Amino acid sequence: QLVESGGGVVQAWGSLNLSCAASGRTFRSSTMGWFRQAPGKEREFVAGQNWHGTNTWYSDSVKGRATIFRDNDKNTIYLQMNSMRPEDTAIYYCFADLLGSAADRSWGPGTQVTVSS
């Protein structure tokens, strides 16, 4: 089970802090990260990180504004974003790929983030 927290209303140019806690199954060796889906658009990748934190990926739309990091002792992954824009408004979903395989992906229920201008 994955549960996101930290969504809500964020002022334009403000900062966002999201967290995703994993429980109920082992997420050891899992790649974890974030997707988002804006109204009327497809779900898109935002950021991801492997278990050891040695590989990190960001979409072009958030690169330079986002930082993803994890605490494996807490089975939790975090996303920080700054300089938030109205186009960042979306439902943000946490994901976990067991053993790094997208074929064994779990999703959180999502958390709404609305950027007000």
Image: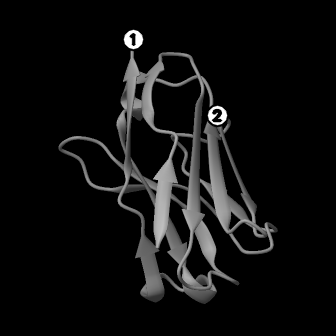
| Location of residue 80 by image quarter | top right
Q: In this rendering, would 114 be left or right of 34?
A: left
Q: Which mark is residue 72?
A: none
Disc 1 residue type?
A: Ser
* Between 22 and 79, the one nearer to me in the picture: 22
- Disc 2 crowd rating (10 Å Cα; few below 14, some 14-19, many 20+) is some
Q: Residue at x 65, y 51 (%)?
A: 78
Question: Which quarter of the rendering shows the C terminus?
Answer: top left
Q: Against 30, is 113 above or below? A: above
Q: Amino acid at mark 2?
A: Arg
Rendered location of residue 2, percent (x, y): 48, 67
Disc with the residue nearer the chain's start (1 vs 2):
2
Expressed as whole percent of the image width and height from the top left, the position of residue 95 reads 49, 67
Q: Residue at x 82, y 68 (%)?
A: 54
Q: Position of residue 43 (x, y in %)?
A: 32, 56
Residue denoted by label 2: 65
- Please give the residue where the numbered disc 1 appears in the rendered image: 117
Figure quadrant of residue 65? top right
